[in-house]
Image (tube, grey):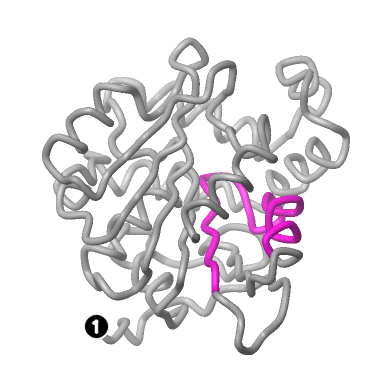
Amino acid sequence: MITPSPAAVPLHIRSWGPSDGAPRALLLHGLTSAARVWWRIAPALADAGWSVTAPDLRGHGRSPRADSYRFDEMTDDVLALSGPWDLIAGHSMGGALTVLALQRNPNFARRAVLIDPAVQNNPADLPAFLAAALARVRNPDLDACRAENPNWDEPTLQAWAESQREVDPEAVRAILETNRPWDVTAAALQMPIPAHVLAADPARNASFIAADGDRLRQANSNWSYEVVPGTSHSVHRDQPDLVIDRLLRAAA
């Protein structure tokens, strides 16, 4: 097993379910989010007999801020959460870090589910994306989020706003500007374990599209994917019951 770097940041952890003897799941949130995003999904896995761990990634939630936010360093943080895990799930940037962690340590987990993973980003979109992300974390507009996502219930909206408030804006800037180009495709092509993608609806600005899924699946039979109609990039917020179902299916 690869030993994580001693420079890894000790992440703040949330846990659900039994601590001993149960199958283990690791949940990784996306950019400008936090472990609290799993508030519905993690307890459902725990009720099904799983021991669930979800960290706040560096610069997010209650985890330490850092001097650097390179993906290799953030992957060190993830690998320090000692596996092997029976299941790992990652949303957006958490999906990218899942791919990188498994490239470095193929034994880190046995199954993966990636929720609209950010495998690659278009550099031309960076200035607008960065501006929007910084505006969101500096002043989360709950009313605008509610209007944009009418199917989110109030606890989901509140968890979204609280996660935004806990993010260090400079961490967001550093993650987006340091990791250019943002492209983990080469690592994804080497996926060593079964990995299933829940892709957002392409009509709602999906990060992962069918062409990505077809390319990965043709190159590596460990990949499978499905598009979840009507969902935004936050598939886990739009369709939590479906995500829970797919996590339990993958684990089975």
Q: Nearer the viewer, residue 57 or 15?
A: 15
Task: Pick whichever, 20 or 158, lies toward us.
Answer: 20
Are there few (<14), some (14-19), or many (20+) residues within 10 Å of tag 1?
Answer: few
Q: Quadrant of residue 225?
A: top left
Residue at the top extreme of this rendering: 203
Quadrant of res 238: top right
> Could you tell me the amino acid type at mark 1?
Ile
What residue sits 32% from the left and 39% below the top? 224
Give the residue displayed 24% in from the left and 22% down from the top.
Answer: 211
- Residue at 34% x, 87% y: name it: 6
Left or right of 87, for residue 40: right
Residue 86 at what x, y percent from top left?
46, 71
- Left or right of 209 in this view: 48: right
Residue 92 shown in magenta: no
Region of the chain picked out in magenta, as a range: 24-45
Residue 49 lies, in percent from the top left, at: 68, 71
Tell me the SS state at disc 1: loop
Q: Residue at x 74, y 34 (%)?
A: 140
- Above or below for 211 versus 75: above
Q: Is residue 99 above or below residue 154?
A: below
Quadrant in which the N terminus is drawn: bottom left
| Residue at mark 1 | 2
